[in-house]
Amino acid sequence: MSSAAPSAEPRNKTRESLKHHGVRLTRQRQILLDLIDNSGEHLDAERLFQLAKLKDPKLNRVTVYRTLKMLKESGLVDELDLMHQAGDQHFYETRLKQEHAHIICLRCGRVEEFFGEPLQKLRRQVESHFGFQIMLARTEIGGYCAHCQALRAQEMREVAEQPALPPVRRKPL
Ligand SMILES: [Zn+2]
Ligand SMILES: [Zn+2]
C-alpha cells in the first residue's frame, strides 16, 4: 500500500491561492511548492535546493532562497525554526496541512506532529478571550523522545557507576 496517490485537490487549492495572491506560478515556484506540499518532512532550504536541483539542474541557490521567501510571504508555506535544534536553519512546510504542534526531541532532533482538537480549542479560546484574529499559530514542544530517555537513563547510570577518581597505584618500595 505504497501508492496512495496525492490527491489533486491540495494542488488546485495552492494554484487558487497563488492566483488570489497575484503570484505567477513560475517553474521554479511550482517545483518548490510541489516538494514542500508532497514532503512528509520538514525540509530546510539547503535540502530543498538539493532536491529542486534534481528536477531542474539550472536552479541556483539564490533563486531557491528567494522563492522560499516569496512563498512564505504569500502565505503558501510556513517557516519553522523547530527550536533551532539544527542550528540556524529554518524549515518549510505546506500551509495546506491542518494546524498541528511540533514535538521536538532535544537530543536526536526527531520531530513529531500533534494534530488535535486541543489546538483548535486553544485557538477559539484566544480568539474569543482577546477578540483576536489569529493569522498564524505555532506550537513547539521540546523534550526527549522515548528512545532518548532510555539512552539518557543509561548514560546517567554509567556516570554514577564510574569511580570518582581512578585508584592511585604506587609501586611498592
Ligand atoms: Zn530523541
Ligand atoms: Zn509540521
Image (cartoon, rainbow, N blue to C red):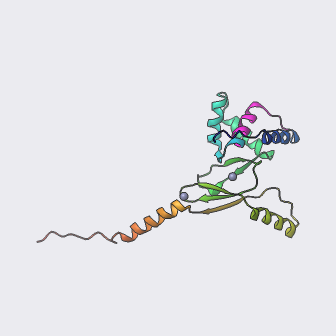
Residue at the (63%, 31%) spot, across then down: 54
Which segment is the magenta one?
Answer: 22-36
Nearest the eye: 117 or 101: 117
From the viewer's perspective, tell me whether residue 103 is left or right of residue 28.
left
Q: Work out whether 165 lies above or below 60.
A: below
Based on the picture, tell me whether residue 31 belongs to the magenta stretch.
Answer: yes
Residue at the left extreme? 173
Q: Is residue 66 visible?
A: no
Residue at the front extreme? 1
| Relative image position of residue 95 (x, y in whole percent) | 76, 48
From the viewer's perspective, tell me whether residue 19 is left or right of residue 54.
right
Quadrant showing the N terminus: top right
Residue at the (80%, 47%) spot, across then down: 75
Please identify the dominant SS of the magenta region.
Answer: helix
| Relative image position of residue 17 (x, y in whole percent) | 84, 42
Res. 57 image quadrant: top right
| Relative image position of residue 37 (x, y in whole percent) | 72, 42
| Relative image position of residue 22 (x, y in whole percent) | 87, 39
Residue at the (39%, 66%) spot, across then down: 158
Based on the picture, tell me whether residue 148 belongs to the magenta stretch.
Answer: no
Res. 144 image quadrant: bottom right
Residue at the (86%, 68%) spot, across then down: 130
Quadrant showing the C terminus: bottom left
From the viewer's perspective, tell me whether residue 155 is left or right of residue 162.
right
From the viewer's perspective, tell me whether residue 147 is left or right of residue 92.
left
